[in-house]
Image (spheres, grey):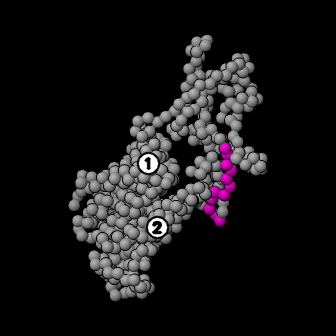
Amino acid sequence: MSIYLPLAELSVNPFVLLAIGGAVGFLSGLFGVGGGFLITPLLIFYNIPPAVAVGTGANQVIGSSISGALAHFKRGTLDFKLGTVLLVAGIFGSTIGVYAFSLLRQLGQLDLAVSILYVFMLGSIGSMMLAESISALRQSRNGQPAPVKKSGQHNWIHRLPLKMRFRTSKIYVSIIPVAMIGAGIGFLSSIMGVGGGFVMVPALIYLLKVPTNVVVGTSLFQIVFVSAYTTIVLSTTNQTVDIVLALLLMVGGVAGAQYGAEIGRKLRGEQLRALLALLVLAVAIRLGFDLFVQPGNVYSLAVLGG
Amino acid sequence: MVVRKKSRVAGMWINTQAVAFENVSASYSVSTTRPMQDITDPKNFQRLSLGANNLYIEPADKAARPATIEEFTAALRILKSDSGSYSERIGGVQFLSQSLFRATLTLPANVPIGSHKARAFLFRNGVFVKESSAPLNIGKVGFEQLAYRFAHEHGFLYGVIAVAIAMATGWLGRMLFSRD
C-alpha cells in the first residue's frame, strides 16, 4: 500500500511514516523536546526532498509541542513573560532564516548548509550534555548530592544592562542574551525545520539558570509559535509544507509522545540527559558521515531558480 | 534544469560545478514492440531522436567546454532514468490487429501535470514508415490536485490551515491519550 504526497510529489508507505512519527513522538515525550531534529533527518534518509522535509518538519513540531505546552500550562510551569520575549526575538530570527533558506536553495547549497548546521549544532550540544550528565551521574554514585542550582553564582551574562525580572523563572537578567537566544533559535527553525527545543533547553538551563521544570514548558510554548510562523512563511515563499506528510507524522507522533512521557517520569534527570545526549550525538555522526564519505552519485538535479 | 556535481572540498562533499540545460523534457517514456536494436539500427534512432539516450538535451551556455557538456548531459540522462522520469518499456506495444495497437506506458509518480505529447513511430523491416502524434493530458485529480493547486496559489492560507490542523491534532492527541 502506498500513498501519494501532493507537494513532495512522490508515493510513500504510510505505515513507515506513522512508525517514524510514533518513534520520534515517543522520544520527544520522553525527553521533553519537539523532536524536529530527528524528524527532518529521518525524512531525508527516507528520500523526501530536503526542502520538503524542513518545511513539513516545522509543521509537525507544532503538533507534538502543543500537547506538552498545554500540560505545563496546567501545572503552572510556563513562564509567559520569558516565553513572549523569546518569541518576539524568535520571529525576527525566523524571518531572516526564511530568506537565507530561499537564497541557499537557489545557490544549490541548501542541503549542505542543513547538514553542516545539524552536524555542528547536534555535535556540540550532544557532547556538552553528555559531559555534564556523566559527571552528574558519577557524583550521585559517589553519594554526593548533584549540584542543583548554584544560586548567587553569576557569570558575565548577569553583568549586561537592560535587566528584566521574570517571576515564574525566578531570574533577574538582561534582555540582550534572552533576545539573542530567541533570534538564534528562530533562524535555526526556518533553516533546519526544527522547533529548537534541543538548543533552547540547554541554553535556558546553563546560560540563564532558569529552573529545569519551567524551562521545558516555556520552551515548548515558544516552539509552538515560532514553528507556526515558520510553517506559514515557508509555505508562502517556498511551498514546501506537505499537509499529508505532516498529518501522518503527527498522528503517529501524538500517540507516541504520551507513552514516552509516562516512561520519562520513571527515569532520573541526569539519566534522561545522558540518553538524550547519546541520541543527539548519534544523529550528528550519521549526518556527518554523509558529509565526508563519497556519495553514491556525485551529480544531482535541480529545477532552475526553484 | 541544473545538474550539479559534488567534489571534495576540505574533506567535505560540496556542490561545486553546475551546468544548466534548457527545455529539458521533464519526463519521457518509450514503449516498443521489440527490443530497440531489433527494430532498426542506432543511426535511425539518433536521426529521429528516439529513445531516452537519443533525446536532444540543450545546454544553456553553448560556449562551455564540449567535454564538460558531454559529462553533465550523460549525468542528466542517468539521473532522469534512475528516478523513473525517463523510461523504456520493451514489449509495451502490442498489435491487436493489422492496423490497431495498444501501448502501455510507465509514468513516474512525479510526472509533471499539463499537456504531454504522445508520438507513434512505425517501422517495417527496419525502415521508418510513418509518424503520428496526439496530445496527452495529465492532471492530478481529487484531493491531491486540490492540495497542490491550493498550496501554489494561496500559499499563505495553506500555511495557516497546516498550522490549524497541527494544533488540532496536538490538542486532540492530548485529549485522547492523556495519562496525567
Residue beneath disc 1: B154
Instruction: Give neighbour class at mark 1: few <14, some 14-19, many 20+ (Cα, 10 Å).
Output: some
Query: Residue B103 at x, y = what percent?
Result: 57, 23
State whether residue A141 is above or below residue A73. below
Q: Foreground: A184 or A278?
A: A184
Name the residue nearer the viewer: A103 or A22: A103
Indicate the quadrant containing the C terminus of chain B: top left, top right, bottom left or bottom right.
Answer: bottom left
In magenta, the rendered stretch is B10-22
Q: Splitting the image into 4 quarters, where does residue A178 fall?
A: bottom left
Q: Is residue A267 left or right of residue A125?
A: left
* Position of residue A39 measured from the top left corner of the image (x, y, whole percent): 43, 56
Q: Amino acid at mark 1?
A: His
Q: Are marks 2 and 1 in contact (CB under 8 Å)?
A: no
Say which residue appears at 60% left-offset and 27% top-offset. B118
Circle 2 sits on which residue?
A: A93
> Is B102 contained in the magenta span?
no
Disc 2 from disc 1: Cα separation: 24 Å
